[in-house]
Amino acid sequence: MVHRVVRSLSVAGFAALALATNVGAQDKTYKVALDGTFAPHAMPRMDGGIEGFNVDLANEIGRRLGGKVEITAAQWSGLLPAMQAGTYDFLVAPTTVTEERTKSLLFTEGYLNTDFQFVVAKDAPEVTSLEDFKGKVIAVNKGSAYDKWARDLEPTVGWKVESYGTNTDAVQAVIAGRAFANVAGNTVSAWAVKKNPRIKLSYLHSTGRVFAMPFRKDSVALRNQVEAAIECMKLDGTMVELSEKWFGVTPGPGAAAVTVQYGYGVPGMEGYEATPHVPACK
Protein backbone atom coordinates (compact mmCIF):
# COMPACT_ATOMS: atom_id res chain seq x y z
CA MET A 1 0.00 0.00 0.00
CA VAL A 2 1.31 3.46 -0.89
CA HIS A 3 0.96 6.01 1.89
CA ARG A 4 -0.21 9.29 0.39
CA VAL A 5 0.75 12.18 2.63
CA VAL A 6 0.40 15.81 1.58
CA ARG A 7 0.77 18.14 4.53
CA SER A 8 -1.57 21.06 5.24
CA LEU A 9 -3.45 20.93 1.94
CA SER A 10 -7.25 20.79 1.84
CA VAL A 11 -9.37 19.00 -0.75
CA ALA A 12 -10.31 22.41 -2.15
CA GLY A 13 -6.64 23.26 -2.36
CA PHE A 14 -6.02 20.19 -4.46
CA ALA A 15 -8.61 21.32 -6.98
CA ALA A 16 -7.53 24.94 -7.08
CA LEU A 17 -3.77 24.56 -7.11
CA ALA A 18 -3.14 21.71 -9.56
CA LEU A 19 0.23 21.89 -11.26
CA ALA A 20 1.00 19.93 -14.42
CA THR A 21 4.20 17.90 -14.29
CA ASN A 22 4.55 17.33 -18.00
CA VAL A 23 5.76 20.89 -18.53
CA GLY A 24 9.09 20.27 -20.22
CA ALA A 25 9.42 21.02 -23.91
CA GLN A 26 8.64 18.05 -26.11
CA ASP A 27 11.75 15.98 -26.80
CA LYS A 28 13.89 18.28 -24.63
CA THR A 29 17.08 16.67 -23.36
CA TYR A 30 18.16 17.38 -19.79
CA LYS A 31 21.86 16.99 -19.08
CA VAL A 32 22.34 15.33 -15.70
CA ALA A 33 25.11 13.51 -13.89
CA LEU A 34 25.88 11.09 -11.09
CA ASP A 35 28.68 9.00 -9.59
CA GLY A 36 28.54 5.74 -11.54
CA THR A 37 30.32 3.70 -8.87
CA PHE A 38 27.91 4.15 -5.92
CA ALA A 39 25.94 0.89 -5.86
CA PRO A 40 23.03 0.39 -5.83
CA HIS A 41 22.28 3.98 -6.83
CA ALA A 42 24.45 3.77 -9.94
CA MET A 43 26.91 1.11 -11.05
CA PRO A 44 28.41 -0.38 -14.22
CA ARG A 45 26.40 -2.96 -16.15
CA MET A 46 28.08 -6.11 -17.36
CA ASP A 47 27.13 -5.26 -20.96
CA GLY A 48 28.23 -1.62 -20.67
CA GLY A 49 26.51 1.52 -19.45
CA ILE A 50 25.20 2.06 -15.93
CA GLU A 51 22.21 0.95 -13.91
CA GLY A 52 20.77 1.53 -10.47
CA PHE A 53 18.08 3.27 -8.44
CA ASN A 54 19.10 6.78 -9.44
CA VAL A 55 19.50 5.82 -13.10
CA ASP A 56 15.92 4.56 -13.18
CA LEU A 57 14.80 7.61 -11.21
CA ALA A 58 16.48 10.01 -13.63
CA ASN A 59 15.00 8.34 -16.72
CA GLU A 60 11.53 8.39 -15.20
CA ILE A 61 11.83 12.09 -14.33
CA GLY A 62 12.79 12.84 -17.92
CA ARG A 63 9.80 10.90 -19.21
CA ARG A 64 7.42 12.75 -16.91
CA LEU A 65 8.85 16.10 -17.97
CA GLY A 66 8.10 15.24 -21.57
CA GLY A 67 11.71 14.76 -22.63
CA LYS A 68 14.66 12.56 -21.82
CA VAL A 69 17.81 12.70 -19.74
CA GLU A 70 21.39 12.44 -20.92
CA ILE A 71 23.20 10.84 -17.99
CA THR A 72 26.93 11.35 -17.46
CA ALA A 73 28.79 9.17 -14.96
CA ALA A 74 31.71 11.00 -13.36
CA GLN A 75 33.62 11.24 -10.09
CA TRP A 76 31.54 12.66 -7.26
CA SER A 77 34.14 15.32 -6.40
CA GLY A 78 33.63 17.03 -9.74
CA LEU A 79 29.85 16.87 -10.05
CA LEU A 80 28.77 19.92 -8.05
CA PRO A 81 31.41 22.28 -9.55
CA ALA A 82 30.49 21.11 -13.07
CA MET A 83 26.78 21.71 -12.46
CA GLN A 84 27.51 25.18 -11.07
CA ALA A 85 29.52 25.90 -14.22
CA GLY A 86 26.53 24.97 -16.40
CA THR A 87 27.75 21.61 -17.67
CA TYR A 88 24.69 19.86 -16.22
CA ASP A 89 21.11 21.05 -15.72
CA PHE A 90 20.93 19.24 -12.38
CA LEU A 91 22.41 16.25 -10.60
CA VAL A 92 20.70 12.90 -10.14
CA ALA A 93 23.38 11.60 -7.77
CA PRO A 94 22.11 10.87 -4.24
CA THR A 95 23.02 14.11 -2.47
CA THR A 96 22.49 14.66 1.24
CA VAL A 97 20.82 17.99 2.02
CA THR A 98 22.82 19.99 4.58
CA GLU A 99 22.62 23.58 5.76
CA GLU A 100 26.01 24.28 4.22
CA ARG A 101 24.99 22.97 0.80
CA THR A 102 21.73 24.93 0.74
CA LYS A 103 23.70 28.18 0.88
CA SER A 104 24.86 27.60 -2.71
CA LEU A 105 22.37 25.06 -4.08
CA LEU A 106 18.64 24.59 -4.54
CA PHE A 107 17.15 21.21 -3.63
CA THR A 108 13.93 19.36 -4.33
CA GLU A 109 12.14 17.80 -1.40
CA GLY A 110 13.75 14.60 -0.17
CA TYR A 111 13.06 11.38 -2.04
CA LEU A 112 14.95 8.96 0.25
CA ASN A 113 16.01 8.99 3.88
CA THR A 114 19.74 8.77 4.43
CA ASP A 115 20.31 7.01 7.74
CA PHE A 116 22.96 4.79 9.34
CA GLN A 117 22.11 1.09 9.06
CA PHE A 118 23.83 -1.84 10.75
CA VAL A 119 24.26 -5.22 9.08
CA VAL A 120 24.80 -8.40 11.12
CA ALA A 121 25.01 -12.13 10.49
CA LYS A 122 21.72 -13.84 9.68
CA ASP A 123 21.66 -15.72 13.02
CA ALA A 124 22.76 -12.76 15.16
CA PRO A 125 20.49 -11.65 18.04
CA GLU A 126 18.17 -8.70 17.52
CA VAL A 127 19.58 -5.27 18.36
CA THR A 128 17.22 -2.57 19.60
CA SER A 129 19.64 0.16 20.75
CA LEU A 130 23.24 1.26 20.37
CA GLU A 131 23.90 -0.03 23.88
CA ASP A 132 23.35 -3.59 22.59
CA PHE A 133 26.60 -3.24 20.63
CA LYS A 134 28.70 -2.82 23.78
CA GLY A 135 31.81 -5.01 23.59
CA LYS A 136 31.19 -5.82 19.92
CA VAL A 137 33.48 -5.24 16.92
CA ILE A 138 32.02 -2.85 14.35
CA ALA A 139 33.48 -2.92 10.82
CA VAL A 140 33.44 0.31 8.77
CA ASN A 141 34.74 1.68 5.50
CA LYS A 142 37.95 3.56 6.33
CA GLY A 143 37.64 7.33 6.11
CA SER A 144 33.88 7.31 5.62
CA ALA A 145 31.37 9.34 7.62
CA TYR A 146 30.41 6.08 9.34
CA ASP A 147 34.02 5.49 10.38
CA LYS A 148 34.22 8.89 12.09
CA TRP A 149 30.77 8.55 13.67
CA ALA A 150 31.53 5.10 15.09
CA ARG A 151 34.93 6.15 16.43
CA ASP A 152 33.49 9.23 18.08
CA LEU A 153 31.03 6.98 19.92
CA GLU A 154 33.61 4.33 20.84
CA PRO A 155 34.13 5.60 24.43
CA THR A 156 30.38 6.07 24.97
CA VAL A 157 28.99 2.85 23.49
CA GLY A 158 31.94 0.66 24.35
CA TRP A 159 32.30 -1.03 20.98
CA LYS A 160 35.54 -1.57 19.07
CA VAL A 161 35.79 -0.08 15.58
CA GLU A 162 37.85 -1.72 12.84
CA SER A 163 38.35 0.01 9.48
CA TYR A 164 38.56 -1.66 6.06
CA GLY A 165 39.57 -0.37 2.65
CA THR A 166 36.08 -0.74 1.19
CA ASN A 167 32.63 -1.26 2.61
CA THR A 168 32.50 -4.59 0.78
CA ASP A 169 35.50 -5.70 2.85
CA ALA A 170 33.78 -4.47 6.02
CA VAL A 171 30.68 -6.52 5.19
CA GLN A 172 32.88 -9.54 4.48
CA ALA A 173 34.34 -9.17 7.98
CA VAL A 174 30.83 -9.69 9.37
CA ILE A 175 30.24 -12.74 7.16
CA ALA A 176 33.60 -14.22 8.21
CA GLY A 177 32.92 -13.60 11.90
CA ARG A 178 35.73 -11.06 12.37
CA ALA A 179 33.20 -8.37 13.23
CA PHE A 180 29.76 -8.45 14.80
CA ALA A 181 28.32 -5.71 12.61
CA ASN A 182 29.00 -3.32 9.77
CA VAL A 183 27.52 0.18 9.67
CA ALA A 184 26.99 2.15 6.45
CA GLY A 185 24.25 4.10 4.69
CA ASN A 186 20.82 2.49 4.84
CA THR A 187 20.50 2.04 1.08
CA VAL A 188 24.00 0.58 0.71
CA SER A 189 23.34 -1.79 3.62
CA ALA A 190 20.02 -2.86 2.13
CA TRP A 191 21.75 -3.62 -1.17
CA ALA A 192 24.39 -5.73 0.60
CA VAL A 193 21.71 -7.77 2.36
CA LYS A 194 19.72 -8.17 -0.85
CA LYS A 195 22.81 -9.66 -2.52
CA ASN A 196 23.92 -11.88 0.37
CA PRO A 197 21.57 -14.25 2.26
CA ARG A 198 24.11 -14.74 5.07
CA ILE A 199 23.50 -11.28 6.53
CA LYS A 200 20.49 -9.21 7.59
CA LEU A 201 19.59 -5.63 8.37
CA SER A 202 19.85 -4.67 12.01
CA TYR A 203 19.63 -1.46 14.03
CA LEU A 204 18.75 1.75 12.14
CA HIS A 205 20.14 5.04 13.45
CA SER A 206 18.04 7.90 12.12
CA THR A 207 19.91 11.04 11.09
CA GLY A 208 16.85 13.05 10.06
CA ARG A 209 18.52 13.77 6.72
CA VAL A 210 17.39 13.06 3.17
CA PHE A 211 18.71 12.63 -0.34
CA ALA A 212 17.37 15.25 -2.78
CA MET A 213 18.11 16.55 -6.28
CA PRO A 214 20.45 19.59 -6.34
CA PHE A 215 20.15 22.52 -8.76
CA ARG A 216 21.81 25.87 -9.34
CA LYS A 217 20.26 28.75 -7.43
CA ASP A 218 18.91 30.24 -10.68
CA SER A 219 17.05 27.05 -11.66
CA VAL A 220 13.92 27.59 -9.57
CA ALA A 221 11.43 26.73 -12.32
CA LEU A 222 13.23 23.52 -13.29
CA ARG A 223 13.62 22.52 -9.63
CA ASN A 224 9.88 22.93 -9.17
CA GLN A 225 9.10 20.87 -12.28
CA VAL A 226 11.37 18.03 -11.18
CA GLU A 227 9.92 18.12 -7.68
CA ALA A 228 6.40 17.80 -9.09
CA ALA A 229 7.51 14.72 -11.04
CA ILE A 230 9.06 13.22 -7.90
CA GLU A 231 5.86 13.89 -5.95
CA CYS A 232 3.82 12.02 -8.56
CA MET A 233 6.24 9.10 -8.31
CA LYS A 234 5.60 9.04 -4.57
CA LEU A 235 1.85 9.18 -4.99
CA ASP A 236 1.49 6.53 -7.71
CA GLY A 237 3.82 3.98 -6.08
CA THR A 238 6.77 4.33 -8.46
CA MET A 239 9.15 5.22 -5.62
CA VAL A 240 8.03 2.17 -3.68
CA GLU A 241 8.61 -0.02 -6.73
CA LEU A 242 12.12 1.37 -7.24
CA SER A 243 12.95 0.91 -3.56
CA GLU A 244 11.79 -2.70 -3.62
CA LYS A 245 13.65 -3.36 -6.87
CA TRP A 246 17.04 -1.96 -5.81
CA PHE A 247 17.03 -2.12 -2.01
CA GLY A 248 14.58 -4.93 -1.26
CA VAL A 249 12.87 -2.54 1.18
CA THR A 250 9.27 -1.28 1.23
CA PRO A 251 9.22 2.30 2.60
CA GLY A 252 6.97 2.70 5.63
CA PRO A 253 4.60 5.53 6.60
CA GLY A 254 6.44 8.83 6.92
CA ALA A 255 9.41 7.74 4.84
CA ALA A 256 10.73 10.32 2.39
CA ALA A 257 10.00 7.95 -0.51
CA VAL A 258 6.23 8.15 0.12
CA THR A 259 5.78 11.54 1.81
CA VAL A 260 4.88 14.58 -0.29
CA GLN A 261 5.98 17.80 1.38
CA TYR A 262 4.11 21.10 1.47
CA GLY A 263 5.88 23.62 -0.74
CA TYR A 264 9.08 23.18 -2.74
CA GLY A 265 12.38 22.01 -1.30
CA VAL A 266 13.26 20.71 2.16
CA PRO A 267 11.29 22.37 4.96
CA GLY A 268 13.46 24.31 7.38
CA MET A 269 16.33 24.64 4.91
CA GLU A 270 17.46 27.65 2.88
CA GLY A 271 15.83 27.64 -0.55
CA TYR A 272 12.57 26.18 0.73
CA GLU A 273 9.56 27.80 -0.93
CA ALA A 274 6.35 27.44 1.04
CA THR A 275 4.10 27.69 -2.01
CA PRO A 276 1.19 25.23 -1.86
CA HIS A 277 0.79 23.13 -4.97
CA VAL A 278 -0.60 19.81 -6.08
CA PRO A 279 0.96 17.81 -8.92
CA ALA A 280 -1.43 16.80 -11.69
CA CYS A 281 -0.01 13.34 -12.21
CA LYS A 282 -0.34 11.56 -15.54
Image: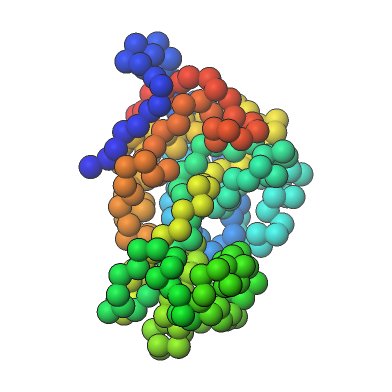
At 57% across and 72% down in the image, what residue appears?
A: 154
Seen as rendered, the residue at the extreme left is 1
The answer to whether residue 218 is above or below residue 200 is above
Tag count: 0
49 or 156: which is nearer to us?
Answer: 156
Left-right relation of 217 to 51? right
Left-right relation of 28 to 219? left
The answer to whether residue 190 is above or below residue 266 is below
Left-right relation of 218 to 16? right
Q: Quadrant of residue 200?
A: bottom left
At 44% across and 37% down in the image, what residue appears?
A: 230
At 45% across and 75% down in the image, what residue appears?
A: 134
Quadrant that contains the C terminus: top left
Q: Percent x, y for residue 203? A: 39, 64
The answer to whether residue 110 is above or below residue 190 is above
Q: Percent x, y for residue 165? A: 60, 80
User: Which colour scheme appears in the figure?
Assistant: rainbow
At 68% across and 53% down in the image, what residue appears?
A: 79
Q: Quadrant of residue 20?
A: top left
Q: Percent x, y for residue 39? A: 49, 65
Q: Percent x, y for residue 115? A: 48, 56
45 or 230: which is nearer to us?
Answer: 230
189 or 149: which is nearer to us?
Answer: 149
